[in-house]
Amino acid sequence: MTDTMNPVNLAQTKSESLASDDFIMSPMVDVCFVNLMRNPIVRKGFCAAVLRISPDMINETEFLPRYLEQEYADEKLGILDVRVRLADGSQINAEMQVRYFDFWDERVLFYLSKMFCEQLKKGDSYKKLRKCIHVSILDFIRFPEDKKCYRTIRFYDEESKELYNDKLELQILELKKLPEEIKTGEDIVNWMRFFKGKTREEFEDMAKTNKYFEEAFNTLQKLSADEQKRLEYELREKAVRDHIAYMDSARREGIAIGEKLGEKRGEKRGEKRGEKSGEKRGEKRGEKKGIQLVKKAFKLHAQGISDEEIAVQCNTSVTKIREILDIDN
């Protein structure tokens, strides 16, 4: 008699296998980051760090429904981000970016402005507008000129340096600049360390620091052990990896095409320049030979030599010699 495993036992075995392996998701994959922020405790801790306040000061956070947006031609992969509304109506939008792309700065400004404008409906008063913060968590270096791993950008008066308005704010976190030893006690830097984590041990160490990181680690473990969530994670990770490979390939191909076009244009320009240079050289040489011919013709003529003989010695026609000497035929 052959032993068979029923679907329930099979699913349980798969779940136990997933739970027992050492795999753990990376928060840098946007689908994992979004699922982390669905947890209200994790969300509260992260938002408090962004606002630089104690989590106890946040009464409520609302996870706004988002979807994989692909509104514009440049968004080939789609945007998977997190948008949170606080009790006072202010909003925080956060997204992971693993690669720099052209017009990144313009895109960030556009989405911050878009979030701000979407607060109002037709006929609403401007007084309804609340603060909007866009948080870019980058796995690349955007500002190579300094070592600051995070920065806040707002509207300031250029001369007085006074804050003009705090309703629009950008926060840029550069994970690759994060120092190995974190000396600052700022929570946002600790969240950066958590997002950059790669191993279960790293997340476990962070979990010991406070209840928000503990909740984040527990959520990561549950997500990593969930077969469906893990499949979504792996598919998204592959899509991002394939997109990067495609962009790299397109960039290399573009460079190669550009080099070939440059070579052809260079050759044509070289030919034209060569022709022009040849013409100029020919003109100069012609002028020089003409002067020598005139001098020689007049010298021979002064010696009483006939026009015919002068033409023979100068290797030219009699007519040419007479034109030089201005003698009528």
Image (cartoon, helix red, strand yellow):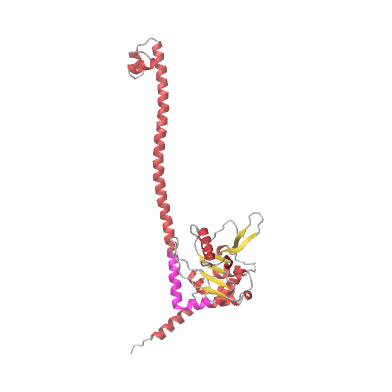
Spot occupied by residue 273 in the image (x, y as percentages of width and height):
41, 37
Q: Toward the viewer: 262 or 115? A: 115
Q: Toward the viewer: 89 or 260? A: 89
Question: In the image, what residue occupies the spot 45% across and 80% down?
Answer: 17
Q: Toward the viewer: 47 or 275? A: 47
| Residue extending furthest toward the right | 160
| Residue extending furthest toward the top | 304
Question: In the image, what residue occupies the spot 56% across and 69% down?
Answer: 91
Question: In the image, what residue occupies the spot 44% across and 73% down?
Answer: 232
Residue 138 visible in image:
no
Residue stretch rendered in magenta on the structure: 219-242
In the figure, is residue 277 to the left or right of 147? left
Q: Is residue 283 magenta?
A: no
Spot occupied by residue 214 in the image (x, y as percentages of width and height):
58, 77
In the figure, is residue 57 to the left or right of 14? right
Q: Quadrant of residue 135?
A: bottom right
Spot occupied by residue 141 in the image (x, y as percentages of width and height):
54, 60
Q: Is residue 226 magenta?
A: yes
**The N terminus: image quadrant:** bottom left
Q: Quadrant of residue 231?
A: bottom left
The image shows residue 172, relative to residue 199, as above or below, that is above
**The C terminus: image quadrant:** top left
| Residue extending furthest toward the front | 123
